[in-house]
């Protein structure tokens, strides 16, 4: 869907959200006000409202935010999980692991675990999952995001022993495997499945397309029984509507709220590790010229966006990862807002024969995060003021993914894709390998020299790893400029007083219902 050609002034756009939110509340007020029900209690149902319906619940697509928030650690589980607060790797379906050679890791697996279809969890199932997600032709999101082009050799030594071998030394292979949700060997290997079977505390009871997803507690779960018998997910694209649902008692937890959604003391802020940026395609005019890509950076008033749209809760970004991620470069400074500089760079490129009138498609996903539509309109106008021809395309998730992940949409011309990138793993490799390597699953371009720098950083460990990735981010800003960074976000979750839960940096991607309990 292409947006209207009408362009609002920055001032008008920044004033619009409050008016729109008020109108939406008026339109939805009757349904919200009249649908309040009893709060969640032990043994009852926990109600969650999301920003969008998941396109699938396929386990190997759980790195997609809208999929993972329902599936991960609820329906399915990984061998190892990363503690989102400490960053430490902790045992889950695997009880221990160690490097047994430069390229091989050996995992001991938990005994007595079954899948929700009654089949046993064992090393064969773990090996099958890795083969299916990483070594097959299914095109799983987790393959490109976490493993890239590397295939892994897996072997079930016995029922509780698994070996995984990488083609070259990989010091963070256990961390990578924490992104694989384990499925039984009965899972299709020729097609992705809509509703997976896992070992988690909840199983999928029903998916009413367009309406609701219901999970029910699974009696055969190997771990502690969760407090809630069911988890029910609905979705509303407008954050103001989600906020009204939690304040009226219609839902217990609302994700992706905005600072001005008026949820009062039901709002809980948390660092979500998400960074918003424009990913620029440098293979088609006018973005082929680095001066035009620099102009895009100068043209965006990042401070104004953070203060006006997000009430100062976000932080202006200078790189794709926030502080706390291994490789974050604290010496980098955000590009200043300088419209005159942006105009002069575009003019200089035009004088040298660059077709600066060629259309740039500003591609944005509907309901991706709060105020995304307003942000898109501001970006369109600010880039247009720099002398660029920008067309805004607001798309649903399935359409937007053709621009985000290989194979990319063809014959589109130059693209500036608005991305929201969350590095929940805590290591820059999970950002750099997918977004900056020439062959990265979400990379438009790169250079042999830059690829070599990235691969050297990937192979390093300790302090050398940290410094190598810091140099990668500095090189990108100075030599390539394939991104226009905007902000590091702060997540806001709405939570009923009847629920005990402290969100963490992973809550926007992996909302563990088993960690929620009724308030006493």
Image: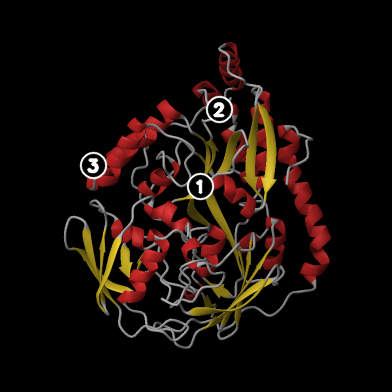
| Residue 314 picture quarter | top right
Could you tell me residue 113's position as x and y percent? 36, 83
Q: Secondary structure at mark 2?
A: loop
| Front disc: 3 or 1 | 1
> Which circle's residue, 2 or 1, is located before the other in the chain?
2
Q: Secondary structure at mark 3?
A: helix
Give above or below for 113 relative to 151. Answer: below
Labelled pair 3, 2 in contact (Cβ < 8 Å): no
Mark 3 highlights which residue? 464
Could you tell me residue 303's position as x and y percent? 57, 35
Quarter of the image with the C terminus is bottom right
- Give the residue at the far top of this rendering: 351
In space, the residues marked 2 and 1 are separated at their CA atoms by 19 Å
Give above or below for 9 relative to 189. Answer: above
Could you tell me residue 218's position as x and y percent? 50, 84
Mark 2 highlights which residue? 287
**Left or right: 40 in relation to 79:** right
For the point 30% across and 41% down, the residue is 455
> Which circle's residue, 3 or 2, is located before the other in the chain?
2
**Left or right: 391 in relation to 415:** right
**Foreground: 306 or 436?**
436
Labelled pair 2, 1 in contact (Cβ < 8 Å): no
**Left or right: 377 in relation to 280:** right
Could you tell me residue 58's position as x and y percent? 52, 67
| Front disc: 2 or 1 | 1
Is any atom of residue 62 visible in this view? no
For the point 36% across and 75% down, the residue is 125
- Give the residue at the far front of this rendering: 190
For the point 58% across and 36% down, the residue is 416
Mark 1 highlights which residue? 406
């Amino acid at each position: 869907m292409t947006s209207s050609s009408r362009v609002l002034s920055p001032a008008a756009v920044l004033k619009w959200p409050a008016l729109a939110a008020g109108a939406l509340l008026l339109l939805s007020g009757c349904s919200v006000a009249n649908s309040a029900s009893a709060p969640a209690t032990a043994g009852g149902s926990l109600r969650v409202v999301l920003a969008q319906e998941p396109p699938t619940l396929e386990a190997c697509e759980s790195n997609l935010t809208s999929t993972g928030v329902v599936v991960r650690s609820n329906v399915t589980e990984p061998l190892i999980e990363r503690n989102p607060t400490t960053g430490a790797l902790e045992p889950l379906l695997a009880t221990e692991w160690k490097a047994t050679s430069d390229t091989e890791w050996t995992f001991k697996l938990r005994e007595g675990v079954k899948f929700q279809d009654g089949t046993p969890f064992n090393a064969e199932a773990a090996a099958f999952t890795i083969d299916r997600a990483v070594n097959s032709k299914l095109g799983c999101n987790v393959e490109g995001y976490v493993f890239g082009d590397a295939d892994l050799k897996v072997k079930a030594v016995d029922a509780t022993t698994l070996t995984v071998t990488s083609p070259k030394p990989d010091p963070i292979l256990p961390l990578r495997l924490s992104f694989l949700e384990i499925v039984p060997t009965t899972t299709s290997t020729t097609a992705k499945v809509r509703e997976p079977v896992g070992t988690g505390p909840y199983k999928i009871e029903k998916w009413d397309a367009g309406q609701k997803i219901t999970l029910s507690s699974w009696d055969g779960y190997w771990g502690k029984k969760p407090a809630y018998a069911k988890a029910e997910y609905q979705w509303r694209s407008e954050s103001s509507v989600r906020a009204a649902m939690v304040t009226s008692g219609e839902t217990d937890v609302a994700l992706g709220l905005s600072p001005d959604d008026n949820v009062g003391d039901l709002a809980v802020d948390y660092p979500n590790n998400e960074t918003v940026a424009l990913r620029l395609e440098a293979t088609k005019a006018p973005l082929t010229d680095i001066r035009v890509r620099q102009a895009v950076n100068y043209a965006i008033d990042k401070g104004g966006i953070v203060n006006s749209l997000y009430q100062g809760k976000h932080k202006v970004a200078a790189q794709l990862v926030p502080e706390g991620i291994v490789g974050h470069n604290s010496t980098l400074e955000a590009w200043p807002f300088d419209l005159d500089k942006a105009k002069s760079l575009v003019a200089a490129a035009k004088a040298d024969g660059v077709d600066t009138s060629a259309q740039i498609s500003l591609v944005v996903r509907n309901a991706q995060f709060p105020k995304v539509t307003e942000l898109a309109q501001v970006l369109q106008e600010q880039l247009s003021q720099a002398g660029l021809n920008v067309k805004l395309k607001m798309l649903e998730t399935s359409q937007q993914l053709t621009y985000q992940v290989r194979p990319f949409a063809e014959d589109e011309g130059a693209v500036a894709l608005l991305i929201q990138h969350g590095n929940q793993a805590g290591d820059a490799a999970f950002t750099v390998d997918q977004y900056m390597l020439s062959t990265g699953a979400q990379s438009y371009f790169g250079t042999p020299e830059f690829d070599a720098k990235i691969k050297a950083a990937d192979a390093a460990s300790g302090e050398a790893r940290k410094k190598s990735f810091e140099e990668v981010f500095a090189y990108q800003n100075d030599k390539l400029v394939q991104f226009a960074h905007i902000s590091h976000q702060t997540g806001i979750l709405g939570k009923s007083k009847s629920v005990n839960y402290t969100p963490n940096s992973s809550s926007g991607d992996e909302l563990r219902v088993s960690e929620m309990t009724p308030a006493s």
